[in-house]
Amino acid sequence: RTPRASKQAATTCEARRRAQVTPTMETALTPGCTARLTRDGASERVLVLCLHEARAEVEREGGVEELVDESMLRPLEPFEGSTARRGEESAVDYAERCKANGNVLFKLRDLSAALAWYQSGSRALHRGAPIEPGARVLVLPGDGAPMRS
């Protein structure tokens, strides 16, 4: 691109970005929304900056901008909007939901997003899982290493 064409494209993208009020990933890709970029057998979340015919300008993690085929993008999964616990959801139920969501993302090869869900479920269990009488538990000393007898 020439510097003038780049400036015009950037201005068009910025105007589209400002016009975007609340992007919804359930319906379509729009400037300003987060989407999943899939290529070479792996996926990652990207910010859609601008759409040009069949291509999209996206921002990857670390602020790297790139022009990709729109066919490589897909909306995020519906559950990805929030990792919050639901009302009276128990720690165990929440951890199960996090595991199921992580499994969906793992199958999509979005490993960092899957890991975030697994960690969220693990933290919930660590903070709030009940230990019932007679349950088997692993006891760790203060340094976190397993005890040896």
Image: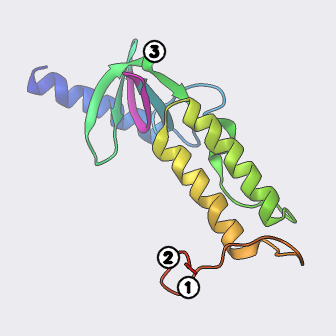
**Quadrant in the picture for the N terminus:** top left
Q: How far apart are marks 3 and 2 (CA)?
A: 47 Å
Residue 10 falls left or right of residue 97: left
State whether residue 10 is above or below residue 81.
Answer: above
Quarter-wise, where is residue 24 in the image?
top right
Q: Residue 25 carries which label?
A: none
Residue name at image x 42 percent, y 38 percent = 46
Q: Residue furthest left?
A: 2
Q: Which mark is residue 141?
A: 1
Residue 24 in sight: no
| Circle 3 or circle 1, nearest the eye | 1
Q: What residue type is disc 3 on?
A: Ser
Task: Tell me where residue 113 appears, x and y as whole percent.
Answer: 52, 45
**Residue at the spot of label 3:** 71
Task: Tell me where residue 121 appears, x and y as whole percent.
Answer: 66, 59
Residues at marks 3 and 1 touching, judged by CB atoms closer than 8 Å: no
Taking depth in this image into account, of 80 and 8 the one nearest to the observer is 80
- Magenta range is 39-51
Q: Residue furthest bottom?
A: 142
State whether residue 58 is above or below residue 134.
Answer: above
**Residue at the spot of label 2:** 145
Q: Distance between the residues labelled 2 and 1?
A: 6 Å
Crowdedness of circle 1 by 10 Å Cα count: few (<14), some, many (20+)? Answer: few
Q: How is the image coloured?
A: rainbow
Quarter-wise, where is residue 45 in the image?
top left
Residue 4 in sight: yes
| Circle 3 or circle 2, nearest the eye | 2
